Image (cartoon, rainbow, N blue to C red):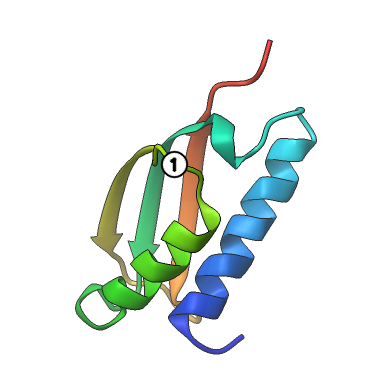
Amino acid sequence: MDGIAAQTKQVLANVEAALSVYGATLADVVKVTAHLQNLAEDFDGFNAAYREVMVQPYPVRTTVGSDLSSILVEIDVVAALPQ
């Protein structure tokens, strides 16, 4: 999948699918850690796609540059499961 925006949206769709198994949604996310292969070049595209998908108020987020082999973005989240 080409481009940081497309990969960001796909990763967040995958996260959303995993959350749904537990009855949670992206609105239940309280912490996000995002790893970008090229932080300097891809941050703006990543951030725009992230803001399109994530629910306000946005969860606390850490975004770092990482040595990712063949992908542009990796995201993990912490969610508070609904009661």
State the image coordinates of residue 41 (x, y, percent, origin top left): 25, 83
* Extreme residue toward the right, this view: 21
Left or right, 79 with reference to 30: right
> In front here: 54 or 77?
54
State the image coordinates of residue 51 (x, y, percent, origin top left): 43, 58
**What amino acid type is highlighted by mark number 1?**
Gln
Left or right, 21 with reference to 63: right
Tell me the residue at 62%/85% (across/down).
1
State the image coordinates of residue 12 (x, y, percent, origin top left): 58, 57
Tell me the residue at 44%/77% (across/down).
72
Left or right, 41 with reference to 6: left
Quadrant, the C terminus: top right
Q: Is residue 56 above or below residue 43?
A: above
**What secondary structure is marked by label 1?**
loop
Tell me the residue at 48%/77% (across/down).
5
Q: Quadrant of residue 20?
A: top right
